[in-house]
């Protein structure tokens, strides 16, 4: 019931302003004769404008805090990512080095086998000089042939092993290089993070006290609406200027009549698409100048 009355009053006020404005263009002296009601409207307008200026300042302060949070918010994540990446690469490096060690040992084992086979061949060859029959000769020849094949097999394994070792050596070297590069990145980011933390600590504290100071000057109902809109807005903007006939928050076009209403500062106007509080850019300018 009370709401209806208010709406009716507003409509009447609007109509009379319009009529007055038209008269004022035709006969400027008429407006000066009705000084009392006009002064009242002006002070009412001023109140809405003041509220919008206060909201704009609050928005601006919150935007600065959001910016600090963004700066800080991404860096710890980047630092964490780099630390995880380096840890992963170090695990891979450890495995590669262990593999490499195993390969070197395997090659050494095969080399020892060759030495053993060569020693045996020497022994058999000596025995060949003292053979008593063909059977003995054939057996010894077969043994020598077998040891020869064993040497060939070991040689093949050594060659394969050496190729693997070389391959791993290259991977280890390139991995070590990458780890060193990442460590440089990590150090830089860690430094940046601690610098920002140090630098912005005071700034953020100052902005937070500014928020408290500004909030004290805004009526509770309006502040509640502001906070509700801000929480719902993806970019944290509850108060936006009109920019090129569009809402500065969602970029939808604002109908001309709404823009006219906005310039009059008779009531707080919200965007019909995103619900953000709209302000006249000139008023935002004013808010800046007196800030
Ligand atoms: Zn909008």
Image (cartoon, helix red, strand yellow):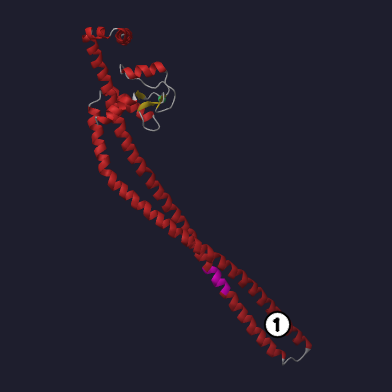
Determine crowd level at label 1: few under 14, some 14-19, many 20+ residues with C-alpha closer than 10 A: many
Q: Nearer the viewer, residue 67 or 281?
A: 281
Where's residue 132, x and y in %? Answer: 75, 92
Q: Nearer the viewer, residue 127 or 160?
A: 160
Give above or below for 113 relative to 85.
Answer: below
Give above or below for 49 relative to 289.
Answer: above
Residue at 39% x, 15% y: name it: 257
Question: How many tags in the picture?
Answer: 1
Where's residue 69, x and y in %? Answer: 34, 40
Magenta span: helix, strand or loop, mainly? helix
Q: Left of 253 or right of it: where is 160?
A: right
Residue at 25% x, 13% y: name it: 41
Q: Is residue 9 visible?
A: no
Indicate the quadrant where residue 110 lies: bottom right
Q: Which residues are magenta?
A: 101-107
Where's residue 218, x and y in %? Answer: 25, 25
Assess whether residue 103 is covered by the magenta stretch. yes
Image quadrant in which the N terminus is located: top left
């Amino acid at each position: 019931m009370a709401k209806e009355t208010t709406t009716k009053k507003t409509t009447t006020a609007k109509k009379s302003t319009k009529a007055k404005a038209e008269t004022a263009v035709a006969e400027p002296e008429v407006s000066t004769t009705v000084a009392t009601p006009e002064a009242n409207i002006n002070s009412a307008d001023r109140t809405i404008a003041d509220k919008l200026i206060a909201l704009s300042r609050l928005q601006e302060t919150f935007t600065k805090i959001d910016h600090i949070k963004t700066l800080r918010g991404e860096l710890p994540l980047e630092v964490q990512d780099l630390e995880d990446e380096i840890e992963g690469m170090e695990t891979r490096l450890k495995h590669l080095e262990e593999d490499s060690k195993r390969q070197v040992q395997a090659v050494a084992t095969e080399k020892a086998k060759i030495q053993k086979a060569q020693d045996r061949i020497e022994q058999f060859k000596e025995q060949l000089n003292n053979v008593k029959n063909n059977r003995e000769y054939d057996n010894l020849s077969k043994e020598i042939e077998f040891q020869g094949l064993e040497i060939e097999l070991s040689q093949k394994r050594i060659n394969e092993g050496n190729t693997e070792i070389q391959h791993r050596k290259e991977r280890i070297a390139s991995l070590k290089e990458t780890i060193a590069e990442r460590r440089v990145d990590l150090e830089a980011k860690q430094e940046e993070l601690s610098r920002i933390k140090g630098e912005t600590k005071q700034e953020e504290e100052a902005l937070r006290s500014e928020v408290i100071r500004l909030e004290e000057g805004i009526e509770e109902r309006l502040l509640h609406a502001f906070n509700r809109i801000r929480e719902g807005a993806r970019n944290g903007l509850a108060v936006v200027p009109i920019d090129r006939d569009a809402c500065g928050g969602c970029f939808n076009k604002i109908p001309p009549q709404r823009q006219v209403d906005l310039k009059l500062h008779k009531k707080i106007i919200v965007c019909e698409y995103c619900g953000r509080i709209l302000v006249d850019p000139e008023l935002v300018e004013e808010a800046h100048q007196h800030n």
